Amino acid sequence: MSEIGQAAGRGRRVFLLDLALENRAILISGAVLLTIVCISAFAGLLTTADPFQIRPRLRLRPPGPDFWFGTDALGRDVFALVLHGGKLSLLVGFLAAVCGAVIGTALGLVTGYFRWLDTVMMRVMDGIMAIPGILFAVALVSLVGPSLWSIVAAITFSEIPRVTRLVRSVVLSVRDEPYVRAAEGIGLPSALVLVRHILPSCIAPLIVQTTYMFAAAILAEAVLGFLGVGFPPDIPSWGNVLAEGRAVFQRAPWTIIAPGLFLALTVMAVNILGDGLRDRLDPRLSRATKVSA
Amino acid sequence: MLRLIALRIVSAVPVMLVVATIVFLLLRLSPGDPATILAGDMAGPDAVARMRVELGLDRPLLIQYFAWLGELAQGHLGQSILSKVPVLALIRDRIEPTLVLAGAAILITVLVAVPLGAIAAWRHNSWVDRAVMTLSVIGFSVPAFVIGYLLILFLSIRADLFPVQGYVSPFVDPIAALRHLVLPSLTLALVFMALIARVTRSSVLEVLGQDFVRTARAKGNREGRILWRHALPNAAVPIITVIGLGIAMLISGVVVTESVFNLPGVGRLTIDAILARDYPVVQGLILFFALIYVGVNLLIDVAYVIVDPRIRY
């Protein structure tokens, strides 16, 4: 574990590229994900249709040559909405995953390293895990109002305990290793021991966990939108496009199927990427596959 | 055994305390204080002030916190500001659809996902294994409400096999209840099945590589007997753990599924309360769900000892 962590720390960019080339699952899912990110980022170049343009006379048109994914209840082009909506959904997923990873790692490092903190912190984490994440998020967003940061914060909150537990378990497994003892022995401050000598061992499992959080956060944004507390409809996101489709679903199923398909494809690519990275980076977790192979 | 149960209950107390604290702070995060919201939009400043005294919001935050904890310790979850009905009574009235739905989903999961996962492990790297793993990734990736709507579209609207939405109590009309239950319970079970099939597969895979399985084979046992009698019981602990952790997933799923299929359960009650800003009900329900989660995991800790006699606390 620690060897791989250090290898990851040394030249991570090159390392990840190597991984992608030798593992088909990582390569394909990475490519799909990159494509979706590019499609969303350059949505304006791929479709000239304005996602905000309302055409009352062209409401609920089925998919056809003019509107590839049909139109919604306001006559807006669903194809344009889905492409432009990806920006916000991917951004929320990315921010929530990164915030969750950073906060969770910081808490996990101190919790694992300072024993007196351990009991209290782990009970707090158990408490957060006991609160249904979606309910907490819906309650928080409806209280403070939907905005990019309130939605990111609401999603991040329930992801933190998993990261904290993960990092803590790695810290506990390496904190008594001779190299950590040696670093402490020469009088290195605890913060430096943690960052320089313990953190590198956490990198590999963290990369995997962050990918899964990214997938979970994209799904959570969609669920928040669906339950009626997502982004206001003036900025498209997959969540609120799906929410808008809910009312007219029986007459115009494409309003749910098109964004749902894009969302599912993205989340699937991220999940497969996570599985591929886990099999490759975290030998402890993929041991089961190796035993019988 | 009794000592174990007592110990677990005691260790659940601080966890619930953390939950209560977070819920308390969550309500205090609202812009403006709760009295303004509780008094309603039409209330004048004196009505708000009266409400503040009535709710004890004029007292220091710490006093409020402990007073509220005291109420909770006596089993008072508060009452709805809209209907004035106690939260516990609301839960009691709405719990049946939720229990029926969740029960059916767990049943489907255990009956389908555990055998599928075990077979996938047994036929490792075969097409069965690939198919199960692919379905599991799909189950993880498609949002439950999209699956629910697709099921409604194809099986209710196009094929007219099942009713579109609504709930019928199994105590009133068992046949109609079953027909109303099929699509919601499938929708809810799908994510759960994806999770359980995956864990079962990796757990059984690990057990199949162990010496006692080879011994069982050497004794001339049939493969089926090896899988179901030797491998699966020894793979049970991780599976049971994940079923417990999956309860959180199931609760979130219940909320979404009840909204898709318009079922009058506790999940729907929660979303309605949140959207109506009925904060005492929201607080009470989040605590209630957390208690279920903690309770189920407590039962699972006890189940370990029954399933695996090697585990001692």
Image: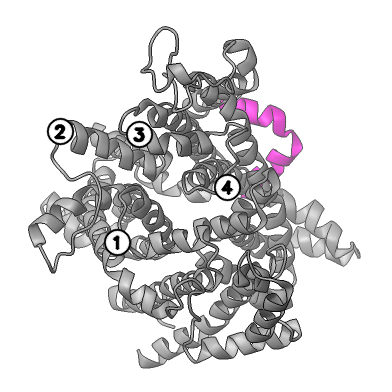
Residue B191 horizontal side relative to residue A217, left or right: left
Front tag of 1 and 4: 1
Residue range corresponding to the magenta coloring: A1-20
**Residue A157 rendering spot, x and y as whole percentages:** 62, 57
Q: Which mark is residue A209?
A: 4
Q: Which residue is mark 3?
A: A249
Q: Which residue is mark 1?
A: B102
Q: Are marks 1 and 4 on the same chain?
A: no
**What secondary structure is found at the residue carrying circle 2?**
loop
**C-alpha span from label 1 to label 3:** 25 Å
**Which mark is nearer the camera, 2 or 3?**
3
Q: Which label lies toward us, 3 or 4?
A: 3
Quadrant assignment, res A190: bottom right
Residue situated in front as seen by the camera: A5 or A244: A244
Q: Position of residue A105 (x, y in %)?
A: 70, 55
Identity, as a three-letter code, of the amino acid under mark 4: Gln
Q: Is residue A16 magenta?
A: yes
Label 2, label 1: how far apart the Cα atoms are: 26 Å
